[in-house]
Amino acid sequence: MAESQTLETPDLHPQTILILNPVAPAVITAVSHRFNLLKLWESSLSKPQFLAAHAASTRALIVNGSTPVDAEILDALPRLQLIFSTSAGLNHIDLPECARRGVSIANAPEIFSEDVADYAVGLLIDVLRRVSSSDRYVRKGLWPVNGDFPLGFKLGGKRVGIVGLGSIGSKIAKRLDAFGCIISYNSRTKKPSVPYTFYANIIDLASNNDVLVVSCALTSETYHIIDKDVMETIGKKGIIINVGRGGLVDEKELVRRLMEGEIGGAGLDVFENGTEVPKELFLMENVVLSPHKAVHTTESITDLKNLVIGNLEAFFANKPLISPVQV
Ligand SMILES: *[C@@H]1O[C@H](CO)[C@@H](O)[C@H](O)[C@H]1NC(C)=O
């Protein structure tokens, strides 16, 4: 242990930034060119050793949406003043603890909204029209053998309930409205400026829709917002699209219902246990699986890179942050 510690001598670089889990390579490269960016995964130290080794110099931390930032990390980094989260959601960060210690937070709130909204629509069209499934059919050589592919379902005219009409949800609504879907939504408060029907209760949203698109933040109130009762209510033909967080849907219940034919289909970009996708879903043609990539496009990563650099430059120059989070 003592030996490995000597491999990394504490440095006192004035612009030291730590990063604990990889984010987009383009972001890492750009930050490394300008600042003293230290990566946990390239260090020979354990996480506690790494934090201790750089505690005296670290003023900023870059995290992705699955890196928890808790009191333990904050305790280990007493000079920390800024956390940049590459995700829009902030449920992985202990915000009250950050506020108490005067640690500022910046994130990437709007950059990804359009891309996520596009992707949600893509998943829904794929589930309804079986695009991915058709692709497999052709590639496996089944077309000339089995003939026509089974019929899918029309998008236009479907009643779509958006769970969470924030930046992403409202862009999903706008897109699906243009496709001829009938939009309604559930959120904490009714939005006076939108023309869509508001349901204060998620069960009412489910009972009045064919599809639920989940695009809200994960909080203690929204954990498993799509639960057994919601799935029961939307019923056999109901479709669930999740581009939010895995924890928003009771995944075990969803898998069970899909296996029993008690729900119509699902398009999932996120899962409860990160990259551990339930194997039962692999053989279901009414389910579209995606490796948490709704936010990632070449363009959005460039925007993210510029936003990270802009915030860090502002921070080290004692100027106001570009995309601060109010906590
Ligand atoms: C996630 O993983 C944990 C630990 O292996 C397990 O207990 C839990 O049931 C998993 N959750 C789901 C939804 O599969």
Image (cartoon, rainbow, N blue to C red):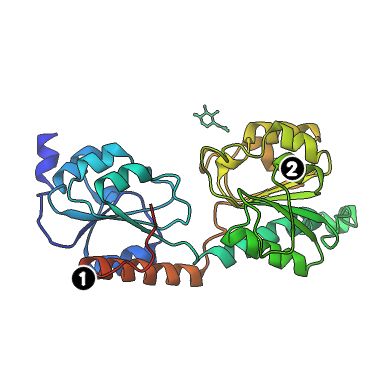
For this orientation, the residue located farthest to the front is 192
Secondary structure type for disc 1: loop
Nearer to us of marks 2 and 1 is 1
Name the one closer to the observer, 36 or 100.
100
Q: Separation of disc 2 and disc 1 at Cα?
A: 53 Å
Q: Is residue 322 above or below residue 325?
A: below
Tag of residue 210? none
Residue placed at 70% from the left, 67% from the top? 175
Q: Is residue 96 above or below residue 19?
A: above
- Residue topped by disc 2: 284
Report whether 44 appears left or right of 181: left
- Residue topped by disc 1: 317
Give, as a three-letter code, the residue at label 2. Answer: Met
Report whether 45 appears left or right of 325: left
Report whether 204 appears left or right of 18: right
- Quarter of the picture containing the N terminus is top left
Q: Mark 1 packing: few (<14 Cα in 10 Å), some, or many (20+)?
A: few
> Is tag 2's residue or tag 1's residue first in the polypeptide sequence?
2
Name the one closer to the observer, 110 or 268.
110
Give, as a three-letter code, the residue at label 1. Answer: Ala
On the image, the x and y values in percent for residue 49 come to 18, 39
